[in-house]
């Protein structure tokens, strides 16, 4: 599901960058060292896998209190939003019934 940017503050990029820098570009969940902006890896799939993102612990993008923001690699961030389940959105199965 794409981000609904209207739910994020106008300075979201600066907030997210500060969270990532404070984490030294490391995933809090698995400890993966992620690429910093401008680092060239030469492989798009590696870049996607080792991109650090910022997760809202309460799943509310309007709550940007520092304690609510968790630096996660792409893989760990997807796991949080999937709830450890397969990548099927709510209601998606009803499309095939």
Image: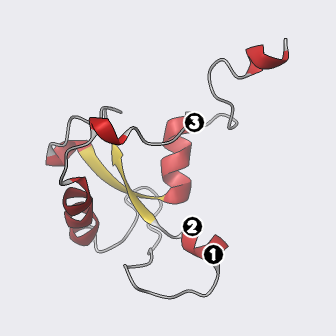
Label 3 Cα neighbours within 10 Å, binned few <14 / some 14-19 / many ≥20: few
Q: Which residue is mark 1?
A: 44
Q: Residue furthest right?
A: 97
The quarter of the displayed image where residue 62 is located: top left
Label 1 Cα neighbours within 10 Å, binned few <14 / some 14-19 / many ≥20: few
Mark 2 vs mark 3: in front:
2
Query: Which secondary structure lies at badge 1?
Result: helix
Q: Which residue is mark 2?
A: 48
Tell me where residue 90 appears, x and y as whole percent: 62, 21
**Height in image: 47 above or below 19?**
below
Tell me where residue 23 appears, x and y as whole percent: 27, 67
Label 2 Cα neighbours within 10 Å, binned few <14 / some 14-19 / many ≥20: some
Q: Residue furthest left?
A: 65
Evaluate whether residue 57 shows in this view: no
Residues under labels 1 and 3: Cα distance? 23 Å
Give the number of the disc on residue 82: 3
Query: Which secondary structure lies at badge 3?
Result: helix
Q: Residue at x 61, y 87 (%)?
A: 42
């Amino acid at each position: 599901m794409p981000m609904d940017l209207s739910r994020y503050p106008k300075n979201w990029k600066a907030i997210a960058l500060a969270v990532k820098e404070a984490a030294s570009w490391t995933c809090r969940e698995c400890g993966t060292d992620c690429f910093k902006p401008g680092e060239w890896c030469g492989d798009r799939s590696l870049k996607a896998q080792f991109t650090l993102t910022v997760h809202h612990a309460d799943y509310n993008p309007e709550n940007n209190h520092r304690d609510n923001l968790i630096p996660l690699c792409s893989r760990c961030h997807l796991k949080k939003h999937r709830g450890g389940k397969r990548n099927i959105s709510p209601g998606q199965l009803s499309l095939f019934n």
